[in-house]
């Protein structure tokens, strides 16, 4: 074996004389001071040469891993310096070129089994050469390393007397097969013994055109083949269209363009469009690349210049998409969409126009003089005008939510182009139910034990004559009994005596209009507090009635005109102090009885009495009435 030995493949079968037991390849011999050892054992169902070939490929993988090149291998067992166990996976060549000095194959065998062949091989490798090769590889850049990792010689056919054949390709690294893969490897490669004869030579390399030709093996020598780099026709276009395309600095004109891209070489493609930023992209094409390549481009924003327009239309306020243009030009705006331009002039109707911009450019707004028509619909209606609106919204008062709605009429006086005064008289309906006043009473339920007239009073009881109204389903009547009360009355839960509601139909506001859009005002309102007494069900001496009280409230508000005819208003109102209530109650309780001796308990008469609670003196005020409301209005 020569000093440079390609171990990727052992071509041809191993002679029967070499056949034997492969059990020795199950364990790798321990390394000694001089050598590192490798063994491989592999199985094939097809042939002895295939089994031997796979064993050689296993050795390939171990040496590749030794130098940091990962391989997928196919074998039953192998052992290397990291102690990897055997695996069965698809074999993929990726070892490249490695300079191997001091590598020796010590033995190889093929063993016939019942259903195939087992191949085994053993190599030893000088440790000094391993370290020297590692240092050489470590000194290389990653690109140099990939270019130089390769073997340089392959053991030839063992069953013929042939000649060595060396295949060199320009560029190097092409994959070479002779005789349908019988002899194969990456160029430059030297096959040690190729049988004489006529063969098919195939050379392939990514991004290059393949070479397939007939080859008559010479007596000895080198075969050099120069590969032609492949090309692919690529169509280039952009997402915008109408862009100019240049490839590697060569102008190809307007898209779409076609050019023959050399495969595997980076191409610089530049797209230029007047409305977008120039885009340069690099791309390397291969046979698998799509036939079309699209460059994504986005149009640049544009601006509107109003300088000439303002010169011919003094005093006109300009708004683009609702934003006022203070200087002569707008901010950056999206191209190819309509933008709303509003021209506004005091006392005149706004003019609305649209404009579409060109990307990356300044569009000059048409400067001709605009004719504005008189505005008679709103605030601009002269110095004195009417004001009116209707509104609806929500209100919050004394811990309850409700609704409010109404309308108002008024007048306004414009002081100047910015400020004015305004007043209005209105009617509104507000649901301002307030919490009860706390004027409650309890039922007290007593038991009265009637006794026969003129009988003695039981010991420990206080007997007396008691007259009460006896109520039943057909009516009632007064009756007098001799007897005594039970000691502890039963208290029935309290009842509200009067429920209060508040209605506020009239209000007046007066304030200042500022900048046309805001109306800040004070407000005064007249409302009515109404209380309805609860029917005491004959147990309280309070007749059913309706009580009313006039309430004056005051507050403030703000009205915001979002548009000329609509907006929102917020206002706050309060009575400022507690409200006096117009009622007086007689505090005397009354006993009112129900004769139930024939029903639940024949020995007793049930008596009921109502008493006002916590009313000493009688409560005659409630808390101040406050409300906050938010409404939407439309008006003029």
Image (cartoon, rainbow, N blue to C red):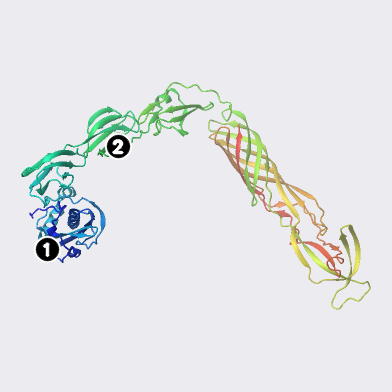
Q: Which quadrant of the structure image shows residue 187?
A: top left
Give the residue displayed 58% in from the left and 26% down from the top: 376
Q: Residues within 10 Å of mark 1 (few under 14, many from 20)?
A: some
Judge from the rendering whether residue 159 lies leftward or rightward of residue 536; answer left or right: left
- What residue would you read off at disc 1? 35
Q: Residues within 10 Å of mark 2 (few under 14, many from 20)?
A: few
- Please state which of residues 617 and 320 is positioned toward the viewer in this rendering: 320
Q: Which quadrant of the structure image shows residue 209?
A: top left
Above or below for 528 versus 384 = below
Above or below for 395 versus 42 = above
- What residue would you read off at disc 2? 290
For numbered disc 1, what is the local secondary structure?
Answer: strand
Above or below for 165 versus 109 = above
For numbered disc 2, what is the local secondary structure?
Answer: loop
Give x and y (percent) for residue 476: 89, 59
Quadrant for the C terminus in the image: top right
Judge from the rendering whether residue 351 lies leftward or rightward of residue 19; answer left or right: right
Residue 123 badge? none
Dot 2 or dot 1, earlier in sequence: 1
Quadrant for the N terminus in the image: bottom left
Number of numbered tags placed on the structure image: 2
Label 2, label 1: how many angstroms apart (C-alpha)? 52 Å
Give x and y (percent) for residue 142: 19, 49
């Amino acid at each position: 074996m020569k000093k440079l030995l390609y171990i990727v493949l052992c071509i041809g079968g191993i002679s029967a004389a070499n056949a034997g037991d492969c059990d020795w390849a199950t364990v790798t011999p321990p390394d000694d001071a001089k050598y590192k050892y490798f063994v491989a054992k592999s199985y094939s169902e097809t042939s002895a040469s295939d089994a031997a070939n796979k064993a050689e490929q296993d050795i390939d993988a171990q040496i590749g891993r030794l130098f940091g090149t990962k391989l997928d291998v196919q074998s039953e067992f192998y052992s290397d310096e990291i102690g990897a166990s055997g695996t069965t996976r698809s074999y993929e060549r990726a070892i490249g070129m490695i300079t191997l000095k001091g590598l020796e194959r010590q033995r190889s065998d093929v063993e016939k089994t019942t259903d195939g062949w087992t191949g085994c091989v053993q190599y030893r490798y000088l440790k000094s050469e391993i370290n020297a090769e590692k240092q050489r590889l470590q000194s290389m850049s990653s690109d140099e390393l990939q270019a130089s990792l390769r073997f340089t010689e392959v053991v030839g056919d063992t069953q013929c007397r042939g000649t060595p054949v060396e295949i060199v390709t320009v560029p190097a690294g092409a994959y070479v097969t002779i005789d349908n893969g019988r002899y194969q490897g990456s160029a430059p490669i030297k096959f040690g013994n190729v049988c004489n004869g006529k063969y098919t030579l195939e050379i392939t390399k990514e991004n290059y055109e393949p070479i397939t030709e007939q080859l008559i093996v010479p007596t000895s020598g080198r075969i050099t083949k120069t590969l032609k780099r492949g090309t692919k026709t690529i169509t280039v276009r952009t997402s915008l269209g109408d862009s100019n395309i240049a490839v590697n600095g060569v102008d190809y004109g307007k898209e779409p363009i076609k050019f023959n891209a050399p495969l595997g070489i980076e191409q610089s493609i530049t797209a230029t469009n007047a409305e977008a930023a120039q885009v340069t992209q690099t791309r390397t094409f291969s046979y698998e690349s799509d036939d079309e390549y699209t460059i994504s481009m986005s149009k640049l924003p544009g601006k509107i210049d109003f300088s000439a327009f303002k010169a011919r239309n003094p005093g006109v306020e300009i708004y683009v998409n609702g934003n006022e243009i203070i200087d002569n030009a707008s901010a950056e705006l999206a191209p190819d969409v309509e933008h709303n331009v509003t021209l506004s002039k005091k006392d005149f109707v706004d003019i609305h126009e649209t404009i579409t911009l060109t990307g990356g450019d300044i569009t000059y707004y048409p400067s001709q003089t605009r004719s504005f028509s008189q505005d008679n619909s709103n605030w601009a209606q002269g110095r004195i005008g009417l004001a009116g609106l209707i509104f609806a919204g929500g209100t919050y008062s004394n811990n309850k939510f409700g609704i409010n709605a109404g309308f108002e009429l008024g007048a306004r006086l414009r002081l100047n182009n910015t400020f004015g005064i305004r007043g209005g008289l209105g009617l509104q309906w507000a649901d301002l139910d307030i919490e009860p006043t706390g004027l409650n009473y309890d039922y007290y339920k007593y038991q009265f034990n009637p006794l026969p007239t003129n009988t003695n009073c039981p010991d420990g009881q206080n007997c007396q004559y008691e007259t009460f109204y006896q109520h039943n389903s057909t009516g009632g009547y007064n009756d007098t009994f001799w007897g005594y009360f039970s000691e502890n009355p039963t208290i029935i839960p309290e009842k509200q005596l009067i429920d209060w509601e508040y209605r506020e139909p009239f209000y007046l506001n007066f304030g200042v209009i500022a900048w046309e859009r805001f109306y800040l005002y004070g407000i005064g309102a007249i409302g009515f507090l109404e209380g309805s007494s609860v029917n005491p069900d004959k147990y309280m001496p309070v007749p059913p009635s309706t009580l009313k009280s006039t309430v004056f409230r005051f507050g403030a508000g703000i009205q915001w005109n979002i548009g000329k005819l609509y907006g929102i208003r917020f206002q706050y109102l309060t009575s400022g102090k507690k409200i006096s209530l117009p009622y007086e109650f007689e505090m005397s309780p009354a006993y009112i009885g129900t004769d139930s001796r024939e029903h639940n308990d024949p020995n007793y008469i049930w008596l009921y009495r109502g008493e006002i609670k916590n009313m000493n003196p009688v409560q005659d005020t409630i808390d101040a009435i406050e409300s906050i409301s938010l409404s939407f209005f439309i008006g003029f």
